[in-house]
Image: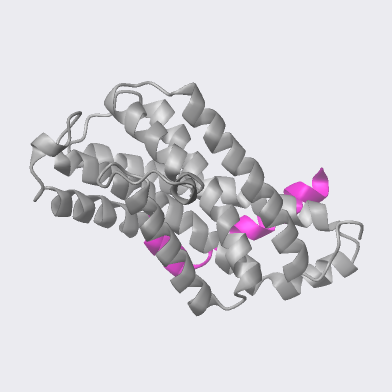
Amino acid sequence: MRSLRVGASANAKTAVREPTTLALLVLLPPFVVYVYGAAMSSFPDVAFLQGSAAAYGRIGGALFATAFLSGLVGLFGTVSAAQADRYLAFSGYAPAVLFGTRVLVSVGVAAAAAAVSLAALLGFGTTVAAPLAAFGVLVLAGVLYSLLGVVVGAIVPRELEGSLVLVFLADMDSFLSGDVLEVSTVLVQAMPLHYPHALFTSAVRDGTLATGDALGALAALAVLFTAAGVGYAAATDQGWSA
């Protein structure tokens, strides 16, 4: 337990010391929430039966900003720290503990991004029916994309190329998971933000969380957690028995 705590603390300090990370956490969510709302305001409100088009855009912007920022931290942590984690594994740290530290940090980053995104959503005039539920869903979306960032970092072990892959996935996911287009395929339903988008929208609009959507989001979390664990083991060249 002490190893997990020490490792998580070290990883968190590394992330906090990056000026770019801090700047993105503070500036990106308000910018994205505003831009998404402004872009969607050109659509007639009649097309959105449960709210204005601008509010709908801001909801999607908050979700995208939280997911993308968390995914970037997961990606950069996997790519930049793979060599260091190999040395730690050789020094006696269990790979499962090292992976656990990454997960703990991802939760912290997701919580920070979610708090800023939710504050931006409220600041731009969107009424949130259930703030705590909405915050929890945003954190869940952030953790999902942080784990996805680990997977992308294991497959594409370069920060620039991995970032391009991640922004493409997050952008398409955020767009297709919403209600702008009536797209209902197995591929869309398998996207990480499909269920969180429905949960977040309902939490903001009427303060409810559908059980089916919650179970779907938890299933996605289990799948990505497993995939990220395998990807992390591959990225650090260590099996879980080490």
- Could you say which is closer to the camera, residue 173 or residue 74? 173
**Residue at image x 72%, y 70%?**
235
Q: Is residue 83 above or below residue 48?
A: below
**Residue at image x 35%, y 51%?**
176
Q: Is residue 209 above or below residue 63?
A: above
Outermost residue, front side: 185
In this image, 241 relative to 56: left or right? right
Residue 97: x percent and y percent? 80, 52
In this image, 221 relative to 235: left or right? left
Residue 178: x percent and y percent? 32, 44
Say if residue 1 shows up in the picture. yes
Residue 207 picture quarter: top left
The N terminus is located in which quarter? top right
Q: Is residue 5 highlighted in magenta?
A: yes
In this image, 74 relative to 113: left or right? right
Q: Is residue 158 above or below residue 37?
A: below
The C terminus is located in which quarter? bottom right
Q: Is residue 107 highlighted in magenta?
A: no
Residue 231 picture quarter: bottom right
Say if residue 8 shows up in the picture. no
Residue 21: x percent and y percent? 46, 64
Q: Main secondary structure of the magenta part?
A: helix
- Could you say which is closer to the camera, residue 129 or residue 166? 166
Q: Is residue 78 above or below residue 130?
A: below
**Residue at image x 38%, y 35%?**
198
Residue 136: x percent and y percent? 47, 33
Count the labels in the image. 0
Stretch of the chain drawn in magenta: 1-25
**Residue at image x 25%, y 46%?**
180
In this image, 46 relative to 103: left or right? left
